[in-house]
Image (cartoon, rainbow, N blue to C red):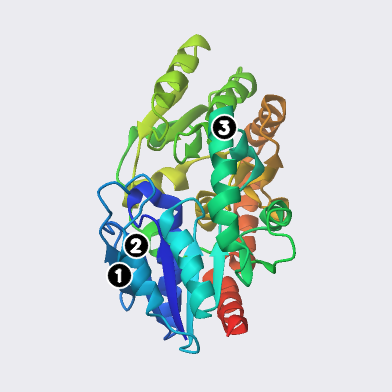
Amino acid sequence: MYIYHITEDHTPANFGIAAAVTLLTRYLAGQGLSTTVCAAGVAETPVPVGVGLAQFPLHPWGRPWRYSGRAMMTYLQGIEENSGAILHLHGVWKAPQWQAARAAARNGVPALLSPHGMLNPWLWQDGRLRRVKKLTYWQTMAYPAFRHLPLIHAVSPLERDNLAPQFPGQRLEVIPNAIDLKEVDALDGIEDSPDPLWDRPYLLFLGRLHVSKAVDLLITAFAQASKGRAFRLVIVGPDSTPGFTARLKAQVRALGLEEQVSFLGPVFGAKKWQIVRHAWALCNPSHSEGLPMVNLEGAAVRVPVVTTHETGLYDWEEGGGLLVHPRVEEMAWALSQALDWSESERHERGRALRHLVERRYSWEAVGPQWLELYASLL
């Protein structure tokens, strides 16, 4: 079995998909499977040990579409039927996925598509012009290529239900994102360095500062829930929507929360895990997601997590987490509940979430599902 992972951009700029591809290929290589990442442009995110890398320079006029001219198509056309190869397409809107789908159909190579939440309904509402452009591309380019794929992969039952009308009659399978608990435990075990941040209890948002993440609603909900309490809200992550962080800071000033809300920017490595581990709770709402790794990361270090149904974590409350919809009144209620927890209840919820992740979202649980799915395509 030879698995080729087709991605438009294997760099930190494509963080969610790059992280998912890295984790999946590392697991497959650890199982002795031959696997290669095929990336348009320079792959700045390292591939795991034992994983191949094929990079295709972008055509000068093809950068917005991540188009590499004939280079990637020629490479894919060399993958023959009955060679034990599988093409795994990650994402939907760029040239590499379109080229790979066409190559798979022409050569009779089995292939599957992972949209990674890119086709969720909320994302189609981003302005009339963008919606028209998306619909036009989908109807004329993307879907005509993808409709011949034998399998569409969803990361949650919610995404599967959203994808069903867009891929009528095609096979849909659910396999969730997974987290490497051994790696998390090793990073989490690094001794803390002193930091005044730990001196007062705080709720934590960790992720891209993007309009889809509902951070503005979180700030308003925190203003309502934190009245008369000594808690803070710490917001960690890069600004991925131009000017969005400035808008959030203006919102904080307008609400008079400058002493309670802090923006730390992006944080990585051991420092990130320390900030997560010391949080009273992780609060990561969203209007639209695949299945965000940050919630699994919080649960992995036994921190209770408040998030939204739109993340696809249908079973989150089984493990002691809280699920609401991205509406201020619901989020304010959930934050108020979290701020009222005793230390013992907070710890118990964190332990329960860790157990849930071990059972359903660890590579020990999820990895064999991928092996079975790939084998079914051959």
Few, some or many residues within 10 Å of mark 1 (<14, 14–19, 20+): some
- Asked if residue 272 shows in the view, the reply is yes
Q: How many marks?
A: 3
- Residue shown at the point (73%, 53%) measured from the top left: 165
Which quadrant of the structure image shows residue 223?
A: top right
The residue tagged 2 is 39
Q: CA distance from mark 3 to mark 1?
A: 33 Å
Residue 239 or 377: which is nearer the viewer?
377
Residue type for callout 1 = Ala
Q: Which mark is residue 54?
A: 1
Residue 296 or 302: which is nearer the viewer?
296
Q: Secondary structure at mark 1?
A: strand
Q: Earlier in the sequence, mark 3 or mark 1?
A: 1
Q: Earlier in the sequence, mark 3 or mark 2?
A: 2
Q: Which mark is residue 126?
A: 3
Q: Is residue 33 above or below residue 197?
A: below
Q: Earlier in the sequence, mark 1 or mark 2?
A: 2
Residue type for callout 3 = Asp
Residue 40 or 104: which is nearer the viewer?
104
Asked if the residues shown at circle 1 and circle 2 are in contact, with their CB atoms under 8 angstroms apart, the answer is: yes
Residue 200 or 359: which is nearer the viewer?
359
- Residue shown at the point (42%, 56%) measured from the top left: 95
Residue 164 appears left or right of 53: right
Q: Secondary structure at mark 3?
A: loop
